[in-house]
Amino acid sequence: MDTLTTQSTVPAPHGRRFPGPREILREPFLAETWRRMLFLLLALPVGLLCVPPALVGRPVGRLQLTLHRRLLGKEFEVRERAEVLGAVHALAALPVHLVALVVTYFCWFVVVINLGYPLRPDNDPTDSWGGPTMAGAWALHGVVGGLGFLLLAPWVARGFTTLQTRLAASLLGRDRRGAGGALALALGSAAVCGLLAVPIVHQL
C-alpha cells in the first residue's frame, strides 16, 4: 500500500518513468482503479458535508484522512488545530472534486456510448465517421472512442486523485511546505478543465 507522508519524501532511485504498454492495458481492470473511481464519487458529497463545520472552526481533517486512507491507501498526519486551513481546504477542494468527478465519469460515458454505438438512437452511419456501413462506423467508434477512452479514463482518475491528495496533505497535514503551490495547481486545473468543458457541453 502506498503511503503519502508530509514529513519526509524519499525520491525514487531511478526517478519518474512513464508507464509501459502492459501497465496501460491492465490499468482499467485493477481493483485500485475502481477504488479511485469510488473515491471520486464520494469526495464531492463528503466535501460538501465538511464545509459547514469547517466554516465554524470544527476539525474535519480526520474525515478527509479516512477517505484517503481507506480508498486510496494514502496517509498523512493531520494537524490538531487547523481551523483556517481546514476551512480553506473545504472550500477550495469543492471545485476540484466536482471537476474530477465530471471529467472522469464523462470519459467512462464516452466508453459506453461508443462501444454500444449500434444501440444509440443517433447511430445513422451514413454521415458518421467510419460509415457509410454500420460495421465500419461501429469499428471506428469502438476502437477510437471506446477502447481509447477505456485506456485513458483510469489515468485521468489517477491524476485527479493524486492532485486531491496533495491538496489535502498540504492544507491539512503537519507540513505546510508546498501548500500554496498545491492550492494554485488544484484551482488552476479545475479552472482549465471547466473552460475546456464548455465546448463539449455545447455539442451534447
Image (spheres, rainbow, N blue to C red):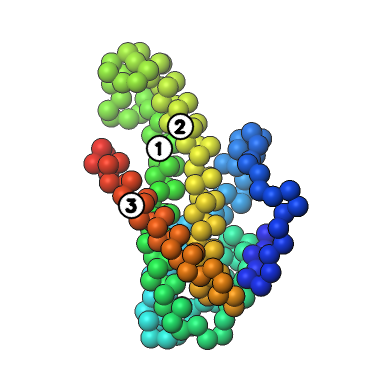
Tell which circle, 1 or 3, labels the residue nearer the N-terminal end.
Answer: 1
98 and 169: which one is in front? 169
Label number found at residue 194: 3
Which residue: 42% across, 22% down?
A: 140
Q: Which residue is mark 2?
A: 146
Whether residue 158 is visible to the viewer of this picture, yes or no, is yes
- Residue 42 placed where, x, y %? 46, 62
Query: SS of the residue at dot 2?
Result: helix
Amino acid type assigned to the residue bearing label 1 in the image: Val
Which residue: 50% across, 39% down?
A: 152
Q: Are marks 1 and 3 in contact (CB under 8 Å)?
A: no
Q: How many marks?
A: 3
The quarter of the image holding the C terminus is top left
Which residue: 63% across, 41% down?
A: 18
Whether residue 64 is visible to the viewer of this picture, yes or no, is no
Q: Counting other residues with Cα less than 10 Å from the Cα at mark 3, is it few (<14), some (14-19), or many (20 or more)?
A: some
- Residue 134 placed where, x, y %? 36, 17
Query: SS of the residue at dot 1?
Result: helix
Which residue: 37% across, 17% down?
A: 130
Q: Which residue is mark 1?
A: 110
- Residue 19 placed where, x, y %? 63, 40
CA separation, marks 1 and 2? 7 Å
Tell which circle, 2 or 3, labels the residue nearer the N-terminal end.
Answer: 2
Q: Counting other residues with Cα less than 10 Å from the Cα at mark 1, is it few (<14), some (14-19), or many (20 or more)?
A: many
Amino acid type assigned to the residue bearing label 3 in the image: Gly
Q: Are marks 1 and 2 in contact (CB under 8 Å)?
A: yes
72 and 166: which one is in front? 166
Q: Is residue 100 above or below residue 175?
A: above
The quarter of the image holding the N terminus is bottom right
